Amino acid sequence: MIGPGDRGDATRRTRGTGGDDVTGSTQKTAGHGPAHAEHARSAADGRTRDAVVRLLLEQGPTTAAGLAEALNLSGPGVRRHLDALVAEGTVATRDAPQPGGRKRGRPARQFLLTASGRARAGREEHGSAELAVAALRRLGEAAGEDAVRAFARDRALAMVGEHREHVLAGADRGERAARLAGALTAEGYAATTRGAGSHDGLDARVTGEQLCQHHCPVADVAAEFPALCEAEAEVFAELLGTHVQRLATIARGDAACTTHVPAQQARGAEQDQHDEHDEQTGTIPAVTTGAGPDVKGRQVV
C-alpha cells in the first residue's frame, strides 16, 4: 500500500503494492481520531518502504525514476521513502555507471541496498546462517578443509540440479547465461544478466555477459567460508562451457555477486577439437577472480 500523500490523484490505485485505494483507506480511519490516522499512515509508509526494499533486492541498483515507475509512485513520494531508508541505513546511493566514460552533466543517482537492507529483506535467513556457520566450522574441525569444499560443491550442484537440462538447452552462451539467471532467481538469488563491453573512444566492443545475483541467501556464511562462492563459480563455468571471472560478491561487501561470462566467439575446427578433448578428459573450465584483460573497461554492478 502506498502512503497518503504519495499521489496527487486521490482516485488513483496502485499497481505494484496491492492496488489499494489510498483515499478510501484514509477516509475509513479519519473517524477514529488523529492518533489512529497517524498509525495508519505509519503502517502504510512501512509497507511502501518494504516494497521499495523488495524491488531493490530483485532488480539491484535502480534510479528513483525507475522505482517510481515500477511502484506507481510520484517522484516526490518515492524520494520521501528513499530519504527515510537512506537515513536509517537500509539504502545507499551512488552515481549510475556511464557506458563509454563520464559524460557532461550530473550523472543519475542509483539507490541500492546496504548490508542491513539485505538483512531486512531476508530476516528469516539470519538464524539459519548462524546454524550453518556453526555446522561448517564443526565439519572443518572434524574432517578438514577438503570436506568443506566437497560440501560446497555438492550444494552448488544441488542448487542448479533441477534446472541443468533447461540451462544446457540454450542455443548459445548468452542464452544459457540468461537461463542460468532465471534458475538462480527461482532459487532465491534475484539474478539478472546484462551485456558487458569495452569502450575505446567511438569503438565499442562486446566482451560478454555479466551474471548478477542481487541477493545471496548464504552471504553471511560465505563471508567466513568463501569455498561456497568458489564452488558456485565452478558450477557456472561447467554449465556455460567456458571460464568465468568472479568480479564481486555480496559476501565481500559488494552490492551484488557479479560473474563475467566471456562472449562466445566464432567456432573453428581447432576449438571443436579443444572442446572434444575437454569433454573426454573431464577438464573443468577455469574460474578466476578479479579483473582480467578480457574484461577491460567492464561495468561492475
Image (spheres, helix red, strand yellow):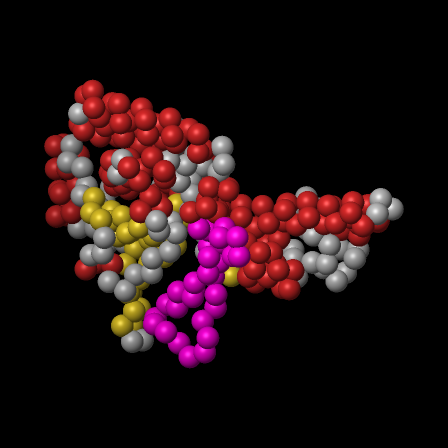
Residue 76, percent from left and from top: 64, 64
Q: Residue furthest front?
A: 35
Numbered range of the magenta stretch: 86-114
**At 16% across and 47% down in the image, what residue appears?**
271
Q: Inspect this view and state whether residue 234 appears.
A: yes
**At 28% across and 27% down in the image, what residue appears?**
136
Side of 126 relative to 285 (left or right):
right
**At 24% across and 47% down in the image, what residue appears?**
244
Quadrant position of the C terminus in the picture: bottom left
Q: Is residue 113 magenta?
A: yes
**At 19% across and 41% down in the image, what residue appears?**
285
Residue 179, percent from left and from top: 40, 41
Residue 107, percent from left and from top: 45, 71
79 lies above or below 101: above
The residue nearer to you, when weighing 130 against 7, is: 130
User: In which image quadrant can residue 281 be found?
Assistant: top left
Residue 81, percent from left and from top: 60, 56
Side of 131 relative to 290 (left or right):
right
Q: Residue furthest top?
A: 142
Q: Inspect this view and state whether residue 206 appears.
A: no
Q: Is residue 249 magenta?
A: no
